Amino acid sequence: MLKIDALQFSYRSNKKILDKIKFDVTKGECVAILGNNGAGKSTMLKCLNKIMSPQKGTVSVNGIDLLKLSRLEIAKNTAYVAQKNEGNQITVYDAILLGRKPYIKISPTKRDYEIVEDIIEGLNLEELSLRYIDELSGGELQKVMIARALAQEPKVLLLDEPTSCLDLKNQLEVLKLIQEITKEKQIAVVIVIHDLNLALRYCDRFLFLKDNSIYCYGGIDVMTPENIGAVYQVPVAVESYHNQRVVIPLT
Ligand SMILES: Nc1ncnc2c1ncn2[C@@H]1O[C@H](COP(=O)(O)OP(=O)(O)OP(=O)(O)O)[C@@H](O)[C@H]1O
């Protein structure tokens, strides 16, 4: 569904931040983007929906070149949740309803409200729905931003560290919901995530970025102590615990 080919990106200094980036994400699949701080993970996510314009390469969704589409058309195809989010004086309900904006012609329809209410229920946001988003905690706001992205009903969902402000219960609940939606709606999901164990639990494939390029990309078979050690410079063991692979640092 999502196809990235020969992507290259530099900020003003001309130093290549991303080079020769090429990978595919299929329908119903969730891909974890992994790598050190500064490796270019967030930049890559922003290149996938034209927040940043790559100097070279293509990003296509179902064969359509995304980088040639208008903002409105891009918003119908991809939804993006940034690493840092700012609140303002609108309610949680309205913030999530804003996710429907690419589809709303004059005013929201019954279906727009139904979609918003289903997502509010799915993410247990009922009690917050009339609160202003600039009065929420960091984790509450993060959930609302994810809810808004889901309301967009994208074909491709791009999430930059979606669990960084969430407590353990919310990390598990939010990633489980994203996993369920990925399978049910057959969308393609790309998640930048630092927690290797959460990635192992909820993602289908794993892409390691190192030195501006893809170090390796694949299924569970790439989550080896050798690859993780080479990318993060930390010795680790990868063990099985109750049928779940876990990464254990050895330092
Ligand atoms: N707006 C910008 N202008 C110039 N350089 C930038 C800009 N944003 C990021 N960079 C640089 O690009 C590189 C990649 O940054 P990016 O934020 O994509 O990394 P990351 O892998 O997401 O890091 P982290 O894990 O710390 O969030 C870094 O060296 C960073 O300093």
Image (cartoon, rainbow, N blue to C red):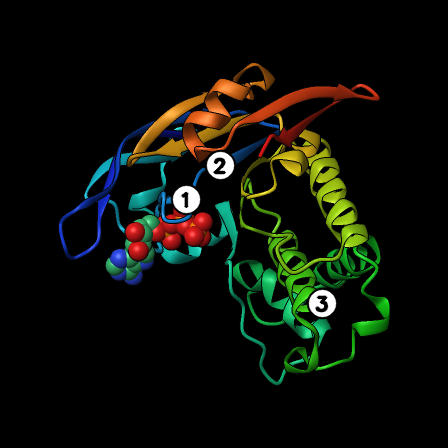
Q: Nearer the viewer, mark 2 or mark 3?
A: 2
* Mark 1 residue element: helix
Tally the marks. 3
Which residue is disc 2 drawn over? Answer: 34
Q: Can residue 166 be seen at all in this image of the molecule?
A: yes
Q: Residue 35: x percent and y percent?
A: 44, 38
Q: Nearer the viewer, residue 202 or 185?
A: 202
Locate the C terminus and report the quarter of the image it occupies.
top right
In this image, 19 relative to 245: left or right? left
Which residue is disc 3 drawn over? Answer: 140
Which residue is disc 1 drawn over? Answer: 41
Rendered position, 47 above or below 1: below
Instruction: Please report the residue visible at 79 percent of the width from the left and 61 percent of the height from the top.
Output: 120
Instruction: Please report the residue visible at 57 percent of the width from the left and 46 percent of the height from the top.
Output: 154
In this image, 106 relative to 244: left or right? left
Rendered position, 135 above or below 40: below
Tell me the distance, in whole angstroms, between the alpha carbons under discs 2 and 3: 24 Å
The residue positioned farthest toward the top in the image shown:
221
Disc 1 within 8 angstroms of ligand 1 (CB): yes
Q: Earlier in the sequence, mark 2 or mark 3?
A: 2
Disc 3 within 8 angstroms of ligand 1 (CB): no
Do the residues bearing badges 1 and 2 touch, measured as CB atoms within 8 Å? yes
Q: Residue 203's mark?
A: none
Inspect the image, locate mark 3, and give the three-letter code of the amino acid beneath it.
Glu
Tell me the distance, in whole angstroms, between the alpha carbons under discs 1 and 2: 7 Å
